[in-house]
Image (cartoon, grey):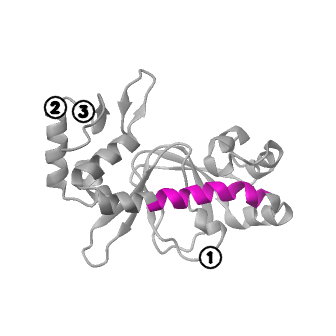
Amino acid sequence: MKPTVSELFLKHVHLFSSIPDEHLKEIQKLTTIRSFKKNTFIVTQGDDSQSLYLVLSGHLKVIVNDEDSGKEIILKFLHHNDYFGELALFDSAPRSASVLTLEETQVVLLPAGHFMAYLNKHPQIALSILPSLANRTRMLSEHIYKLASLDTYGRVADLLRDQAKKDAAGIYKTPKMTHQDIANAVGASREMVTKILKELKVGKYIDIVNKQIIVNRDLPKYW
């Protein structure tokens, strides 16, 4: 029997949070669990794969490659309960970005064909997922605005605030990120990111342990 995920997990994924439990039980039957090692591409930019992926565990980054400069641009970091590949539910266009694991990762795979067949039988479910998709579009617009309006420090600080989550001990820390990862995510040089992090560390705003950034207190508004 193929391994599937519980409907309780699906309920905690924002895309499915408004779907009634009886439908989640049926959608759960359409899923499978896949495991990937660190530094594995789950999807690649330009692929024709047609599935939605839900992050069960692990840490990933969504990237595109600039054809002119050859540089990697990080669009987003993904964690537990995040999802990606949702556009595959609505069109058959090639993947617009690649997704790479940063540590051992488990994802829940939901084939677009299976899910669309279910929506055809239960069209009211589509209305339940529209608010989440609209919210994601709104967040993308906000992200673009911040990239355009904030200076380099502002973009670094915004990324740290977004990524730092409270652990069981009440400590706010990010997943493991290299200085280059941060630079690629905020559109800056690695040298500038290193300088900003060094000064934040000197000011005791942050500590860095095993590539995880610990945020000790509110970051200054300006640098």
Mark 2 vs mark 1: give the one in front.
Answer: 2
Tell me the CA gap for discs 3 and 1.
44 Å
Mark 2 and mark 1 lie on one chain; the one further toward the N terminus is: 1
From what the image shows, is residue 16 above or below residue 141?
above
Q: Position of residue 191 (x, y in %)?
A: 14, 53
Q: Provide the residue span drawn in magenta.
A: 125-141
Query: Residue at horizontal 72%, vertical 47%?
Result: 18
Is 15 magenta? The answer is: no
Q: Looking at the rendered structure, which numbered label has been put on residue 117?
A: none
Reading the image, the residue beneath label 2 is: 203
Query: Residue at horizontal 15%, vertical 40%?
Result: 198
Q: Secondary structure at mark 2?
A: loop
**The image quarter in which residue 63 lies:** bottom left
Mark 3 vs mark 2: give the one in front.
Answer: 2
Mark 3 vs mark 1: give the one in front.
Answer: 3
Left or right of residue 179, residue 3 in this image? right
Residue 170 visible in this rendered orientation of the protein: yes
Q: Amino acid at mark 3?
A: Ile
Q: Position of residue 105 (x, y in %)?
A: 49, 46
Reading the image, the residue beneath label 1 is: 92
Q: Amino acid at mark 2?
A: Gly
Q: Position of residue 84 (x, y in %)?
A: 54, 58
Looking at this rendering, what residue extends furthest in the right direction?
121
Reading the image, the residue beneath label 3 is: 206
Tell me whether circle 3 and circle 1 mark residues in contact (CB < 8 Å). no
Tell me the CA gap for discs 3 and 2.
8 Å
Q: Amino acid at mark 1?
A: Ser
Mark 3 and mark 1 lie on one chain; the one further toward the N terminus is: 1
Q: Residues within 10 Å of mark 2 (few under 14, many from 20)?
A: few
Q: Residues within 10 Å of mark 1 (few under 14, many from 20)?
A: few
Q: Secondary structure at mark 1?
A: loop
